[in-house]
Structure formats: structure tokens, C-alpha cells
Image: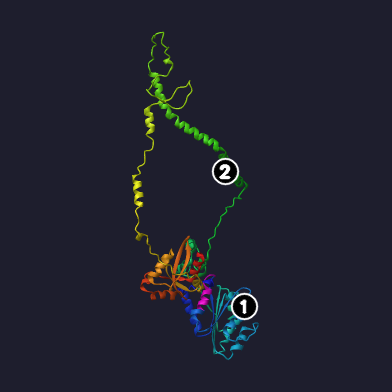
Amino acid sequence: MSVTHQSRVLELDSQVELLERLQLLTHFTSNFVTISGASGAGKTWLAQRFLEAWAQDKNQALLMCHPNQSDEQHRTTILTQLLSEPMFNPADNLVESFTRNMEHESCDIVIVVDDAHLLNETLISELWLLVMQTQRQSRWRINVVLFSRVASLDGLFRRLSHGQDIKPIELEIDPLSAQEAERFFEQLVMRFVEDDMERRVRNAYRTVAKRPGDIMALGDQKAEKKVVIRSIIGSPINIALVVLLLLVIIGGGYWWMMSQPTPDEAAQQITEQVEQTVIPTLEEPESEVSQAVATEPTQEPTETPSDLVEDDSSALPPEVVNKPESVGVIEDDSQRVVITSEVVDALMENEAQPADTAEVEKLVDDARVEVPAESNSQVFTPITFEFAVDELNSYSPRSYTLQLAAVNSRLEVQNFLNRYELNDKVQVYPTTRSGVEWFIITFDNYPTIQMARDAVENLPESLQKLDPWAKSLNQVQREIARGN
């Protein structure tokens, strides 16, 4: 489990049982205890939690092993934590250096080694001999607790304890039950996951091993864009088919572009469509006229006096109406198109009627009514609070605060402060979520989450009704950074 999460304390039943047993083993006598577990089983967290809460009355030394560290570095780390004024040579045996400094002193010591499988066999043998030395020193009580991977040191322990009355005590970290894993996931992972990552993390939890380290790692996932590329290099035929398909698509697109009419051709087509739509509307009166001409009886010529002008009325078109109206200019040898007064009246019916402006004039008159001076006055709430960004960033990210409310404007913040008389008693900071600006109102600072929860009972009853909840300063500082 990552040490960055050690401030999130959640002791599960299986872990508490192991810590209680370890406390009992190291309380009354000296023992050499090995605790083994798979990667991610929570060995680092258990080692530090044991020293923090279950071995407070002992002189402690914690050795966290890393690759490429020498035995001299390991001896120096252990002795400088146990001795107030250490006088030793790092190259000397650990037992000799400790005996030289504490020969006439009494001690109650616990040495915890994390990732003990990274230690050399020489240093593990020295720790074993140090526990054996306590059998000859009645004033000494020394316990060595090694956290290592499963079965990584079994062979060495069998060789060290061969023929000895004292044997190493071996414990194993049990896997989390389904209920413990669910509680661990909800309280230590989902509470600190961003909203846009919640669905992704929950889906990943279904397949992850139910170990603290693996579950905690889900909270550190980043949004990754994955591109899945399927190989098509199965055979040359597949490649040829893909290339041919691409050529067909490109050729079809080029043909479609070339088949589109040019702007001039499109304009000409539109003009022709308009003409074909308008001209037939004028042919109906023309047909009526033609029918009238066809049904007009032919006048037989009559004799006239010789002194009269010759009657050439047969060369003129017959009268259809008394006062015909002609449209356009036509050639002499073409038929004249005549529109009757009924057609003209039908065309005039499409003209727009004058708009009734009485309703508009009434609205204008109403708008001119003077508004009383009292209606123009507004009450403004002065903004007196200031953001506490620097103050919140100065707090330890391992501490906690109480979130009272979250609103969307400065005016709402000021109204909240005025309503509950909280000026100069809270910290306010801005942030954004999904592009929307928020203003978060928090109260005080507490070193642990339990102290923050207990402090809710000391708030006024009106604030308790708002259900304030404990919020990690680590999350607060991340929201401040997101708002900036």
C-alpha cells in the first residue's frame, strides 16, 4: 500500500486482529516475528500502524528497505533511532555495536523492518543474534518484526533456528473479505475520486484483486485514450482488397463532385423552373379566349354602298369583352393574351391588408406611463468576505475541515454568512466543476477525521441541520488548484 495514503486510517477487523496478536507477542518477552503477505496486502501500512498505535510504550526503530542499500546503511538507520548518543562503527556487527552502548542499561525495544526480503542474509542473521542475546541479558527486551513477501525467507529461518530452543514466530496477512474490500473501496477510494472518473474506477474494481494495495491503486488511475489497432497483415489478398476499397471510395467521391452543377448552371435551372411555374398560370385565360374565338359564329358579308369604306373587321380578332386588358408586347403575327377583369380581381385579393395597429399603439401608450420612483430603488447586500485560499493551502493535506455549504455566487455566500452569523469564522474558496463555478464554505481545521466529525456536535443547531461533513484538506487543495 502506498505510504501517501497512510493518513487515511481505516482499521478493518482482519487487520485489527493481526495487530492485537502482534502487540501481545511483543509485550511480555523478546521474540523474532515474521509477517508475510502478497504484494499489495498492506504490509507497509500495517508496519507503520503498529508502531503508531500499538507499540507506543516501546523504543522504536523502523527500517524501510530499498534496493542497492548496503549493510552499513541499514545498521546506521537502526542504531541512530535506538541510541540517544550512538558510538559505533557501521562496519561492525550489529550485536557488538549495540552491546557496547547498552551493556549496563535496560531497554524495551521493537525493531520493525519493512520489505525484509531485500535485506542481505548477513543482516538478518545479526538481528536474529540480537534477539538471542536478550536471553543472557535480563534487563533487555528486544523484539524484531520483519514484514516480507510470502515464503521468501523460510529457508534462511530454518537454518538460523536449527538446534535452537527459540523459533521464529510466523504470521500471515489474510486477504480481505468481500465486505471488508467493499468498505475499504468506498471509504478510501471513491470518496477521493473525481466525478468524471467514477464510472471507470467502479468498473476496474470488479476485476482487481481484493487486496488493499491493488484497491488503493484504483484511485490513482488517469484517463487514458486507448486506440485499438486490428492487424490486417493476414495475407496479400486482404491488403489488396483494402486498397481496392479505398480507391473505389475515392473515385466515387470524385465522380460525385464532378457531377454537381456549376453555379451558373444551377442559376439557369432555377430560372427555368420559375418560368415553367409562372407561364402556365397565364395560359388558362388564353384557352378561354381561344374557345371564345372558336365558338364565335362567322359573320356573312353583306352588301354595302359603294361610297362606304370597305369593312375589314374580319381581319381583326373578335371581341371577347368590352374593355380587355393586355399584358406585355407581342408580335403582330402572334395571338394576343387577354386577361379579364375577374382574373385581375383574383390577383388583387392576394395583396396584404393594412395591419391593425391599435394593439401596438396601446402597448406604446402603456410603456409611456411613468414608473413611481419607489420601484427603482433596490436593496444591495455588501460583499464583506474574502477568499481563504492561502490559509487553506497552508494547512497540512493530512488534516480535515467541515464543509458547510456549496453555492454558485458570491451573493449567496454573503447571504449564508449573514444568516448564520459566520463572518470571520469560516473559510471560503472558489473552484470549478464541469465548467460551473462553485464557492465552498468550510469551517475550522482538525488533525484527524474523527475530531472533525465530533466537532459537528459543538456547532449551533441551525448549522447541524445542514449536515456538515468532514472533508480532507488534500481534496480541498486539489479543488483550489482546479479553480485556478
- Secondary structure of residue under mark 1: helix
Q: In 3D space, how far apart are the residues under numbered discs 2 and 1 (Cα atoms)?
A: 70 Å
Neighbour tally class for label 2: few under 14, some 14-19, many 20 plus, Cα within 10 Å:
few
Q: Does 353 sit left or right of 46 as displayed?
A: left
The x and y percentages for residue 475 are: 49, 68
Residue beneath the point at 63% across and 85% down:
88
- In reply to whether residue 49 is colored magenta, the answer given is yes
Say whether marks 2 and 1 touch (CB < 8 Å). no
The x and y percentages for residue 137 are: 56, 89
Q: Which residue is mark 2?
A: 249
Neighbour tally class for label 1: few under 14, some 14-19, many 20 plus, Cα within 10 Å:
some
Near-viewer residue (369 or 11): 369
Q: Which residue is mark 1?
A: 121
Q: Which residues are magenta?
A: 39-50
The x and y percentages for residue 132 are: 57, 85
- In reply to whether residue 19 is colored magenta, the answer given is no
Residue beneath the point at 51% across and 75% down:
46
- Secondary structure of residue under mark 2: helix
The x and y percentages for residue 85 are: 60, 87
Q: Amino acid at mark 2?
A: Ile
**In the rendering, which numbered label is found on residue 70?**
none
Task: Choose mark 2 or mark 1, whichever is in front.
Answer: 2
